[in-house]
Each structure stands twice: as C-alpha cells, then as structure tokens.
Amino acid sequence: MGPTASGKTDLAIKLSAVIDTHIISVDSAMIYRGMDIGTAKPDSQELSQAPHSLIDIRDPNQAYSVSEFIEDAKSEVNKAHQQDKLAILVGGTMLYHKALLDGIADLPSSNLENRSLLESLAAEHGLESLHKQLSELDPIIASKINSNDPQRIMRALDVIWQTGVPFSTLQTKNESAAAAQWNHYVVQLLPDPRHMLHQKIEKRFKQMIAQGFIDEVKILLNTPNLSKDSPGLKAVGYKQAVEHLESKVSLAEMQELGIIATRQFAKRQFTWLRGLKNDTNFNPFDANYQTLAIDKIQQWYELSKKSFNQQ
C-alpha cells in the first residue's frame, strides 16, 4: 500500500517475476471499465505480463461497496491459495486495505426507498444539507466524510435510518474481520521528501492528458446510461475533466485543478497510512528499494511456507 504515484503497481509486477503470484487490485477507480488513462491502470503489456484481478469489473454508473470488495478480494485470495500462489493485494484505496486488515461491521444492505428519498433531498436542498443532517446524527462519521461525497453520506444516513444506531458505532464492531484468517505481510511505500512525490504527480497527470485522457472522458460521457453523476466519474481527475468538457474551466485550469486534487488525495492517503499497521516500509525514492523490498518479501514468504508445512 502507498499513496498515488508511489510505484505500487510497478513493485507488484517486479515481484511477480520472481514469485508465482496472483495480483489483486485494491483500487476503487480501476474497477471501472473504460476508465484506463485517468486511473493509471496497468496497460495491456503489463497485464499480459502480470494479470490483475478486480480490474474492469463494473461500469462507471455502478456503485461498488466496501463489503462487495471484501467478498471479491477474499474469493481471489482463496483462488490464489488453491493454485499455490502468493496473493498480492496492491492499490491505494486505503478504506479497502483497512477493511481487509481490521474487518468491517455487519451493515444492512442499501434500502432502495431510503436511497431514492436521499437523492431527492440532495437534488432539492443540496448535498450540504444531507451532510449537516449526518453531523447531527453521527458527528464522528460526518467528520470523516467529505461534504462533497454523495455515496458515503447517503450510505451512512441510510444505515442510521435503518438501524437507529450511529454508523460510526457499527463500524467499530468489526464483526467480519477478513485478513485475520491469512498469514499476511504489510508493505508500505512512503515517499520522502514529499515534494518529489508532488513533482511525480504533476508529471504523471500531464502525461495522462497527452495520452488522451480528455478524449477518454468524452467517450464516457457519450456512453448510454453514463453521466457526470455516475460514481466512476466522481473520481479524482475525472471530475475536473468533466468540468472542462462542460466549458466551466479551460484545459490549463483543469490540469492545475487535477494536479491539486491528486496531491490532496495523496495527503489523505498518507493520513490513512499512519493509522494502518505495517510490517515494513520503504521509500520509493531510495536507490535499490525494489530489490530490498522483494528480498524482504521473499524471506517472509519462505518462512511462512516453512511454518505452514510444519503445521
């Protein structure tokens, strides 16, 4: 795990060349079909060399919950073990990582009537009013959810309406721990100094635009059943590209806003990383860090197999 542009995918692919692995994506944007350039999704050559599961499994207009990810990830890990492969979970969606490591509460399924009412309220009074309501019912969870995040605000309110219990209280129960059943090893990539990561983010965003990112978003907006309000198009970068295509901002402004949003996203990822346990960490700007990381993982893997065989 690590912030955006820290080299997670590259390390996973390098590791797959020396250990028989099954790579599982932990990324809430790479799940969407047609969202390739703006998510820095591995290209066809990389995927042929090291296939990734949980990529391209949803259309951008489809929601994808943490609980769905947990079930899919558990299935892919079990599949890897059945094939005697090392499962590598790689990506930057820290909520998914936390759910895998610590488990998630046993929450009720989404209520369609509640969802419809919440969408109507948001359309009539604005998303800010829903966030204010959430703050009154559950200030703890409201402080953790961005006021511009409709999916998480509505989900939290839906659960509270159904159960009468604060969403944050249910979250802390951790009734369905996932990773506890596996012998796992957590590697964090922590880029330092931070300004070098910012430079890398800027360079990569400009490369995305040069590779046809704007055309990618244009195609998505012209796809039946997709719109700017589709869950996938709320992702970092895509939201700014939509604003440009709506003539709200120039290309230069969109580029600058996209870079700023990506840096803010990386900052939030660092906050998550500080709260997640790790077994080892590496600075991707250090020379030979990939060799050191792969050696460390290999050592752990060999010890794990030896311990398992002795059992």
Image: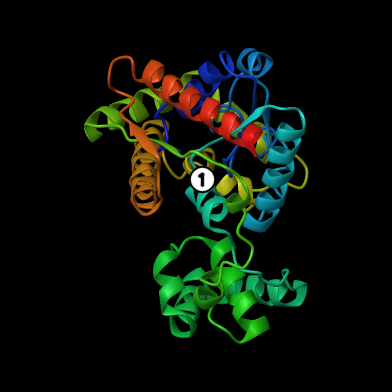
Q: For residue 163, what is the image quadrant?
A: bottom right
Query: Is 129 drawn above or below residue 188 in the view shown?
Result: below
Q: Position of residue 234 (x, y in %)?
A: 55, 49
Dot 1, crowdedness within 10 Å: few (<14), some or many (≥20)? Answer: some
The C terminus sits in image quarter: top right
Considering every residue shown, the one lying at the far bottom of the view is 164
Q: Position of residue 1 (x, y in %)?
A: 46, 38
- Residue at the (70%, 77%) spot, across then down: 114
Q: Position of residue 125 (x, y in %)?
A: 54, 76
Q: Is residue 199 left or right of residue 279?
A: left
- Residue at the (39%, 30%) spot, across then down: 6
Of residue 74 and residue 134, the one placed in the foreground of this image is 74
Q: For residue 22, what is the image quadrant?
A: top right
Query: Is 110 drawn above or below residue 222 in the view shown?
Result: below
Examine the rendering and report whether any part of residue 218 can be seen: no
Considering every residue shown, the one lying at the far front of the view is 310
Examine the rendering and report whether any part of residue 229 can be seen: yes
Q: Is residue 104 left or right of residue 284?
A: right
**Where is mark 1, residue-wise?**
93
Q: How many marks?
A: 1
Which SS class for mark 1?
loop
Q: Amino acid at mark 1?
A: Thr
Query: Is 297 drawn above or below residue 78 in the view shown?
Result: above
Of residue 203 and residue 106, the one placed in the foreground of this image is 106
Q: Is residue 196 left or right of residue 257?
A: left
- Residue at the (73%, 69%) spot, across then down: 109
Of residue 67 and residue 133, the one placed in the foreground of this image is 67
Q: Position of residue 209 (x, y in %)?
A: 47, 24
Query: Is 188 drawn above or below residue 293 in the view shown?
Result: below
- Residue at the (41%, 30%) spot, across then down: 5
